[in-house]
Image: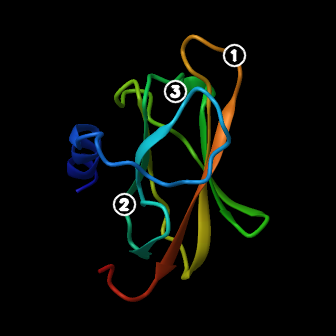
Amino acid sequence: MLRRTMIAALLVLPGQAVHAQQPAGDVHVLESTPAANAHIGRKSSAFFVRFDRPVDHSKSTLTITHGDKVIERLHPRLESAPEVLFAAAPTLPPGDYKLHWAVITLQGTKAIEGDIPFKVSDQPPQ
């Protein structure tokens, strides 16, 4: 199941824009799972963020926060597509969360970061 999700995450067309909160910079989010303001079930298996250009996987981070508290630091898979940060998702209790991302492009040294808000509930996602 995780392998299928990973393959799907890497093959999804990047044409859909995500309206995640992000500062002005040279890297832009094209798509993410969960999408901005999405409602997901507790048993989500993977998170990913697709950018408009390649990022340095080894220097980039994905973090799940609940309020000001860090819930989980995710480990992006180094073998994902150059413009995608992909990580296995933990099982989260119901609540409001943010997927915080911080990336460095392959050409630069400046970190760009942003947040993708989402909600976890016991109800099946619609």
Residue at 58% in and 26% down: 26
Could you tell me if the residues under marks 2 and 3 are in contact, i.e. CB atoms within 8 Å?
Answer: no
* Mark 2 vs mark 1: in front: 1
- Mark 1 highlights which residue? 109
Asked if residue 68 lies left or right of residue 113, the reply is right
Disc 1 and disc 3: Cα gap in Å? 13 Å
Callout 2: SS = loop
Residue 8, label in figure: none
N-term-proximal mark, 2 vs 3: 2
Viewer-closest of 28 and 109: 28
Callout 1: SS = loop
**Quadrant location, the C terminus:** bottom left
Q: Amino acid at mark 1?
A: Thr
- Mark 2 highlights which residue? 45
Residue at 74% in and 70% down: 67
Could you tell me if the residues under marks 2 and 1 are in contact, i.e. CB atoms within 8 Å?
Answer: no
Residue most toward the bottom?
A: 123
N-term-proximal mark, 2 vs 1: 2
Residue at 52% in and 75% down: 119
- Mark 3 highlights which residue? 57
| Residue 13 image offset from top left, x and y in percent | 23, 41
Q: Amino acid at mark 2?
A: Ser
| Mark 1 crowd level (few <14, some 14–19, many ≥20, 10 Å Cα) | few
**Quadrant location, the N terminus:** bottom left
Disc 2 and disc 3: Cα gap in Å? 20 Å
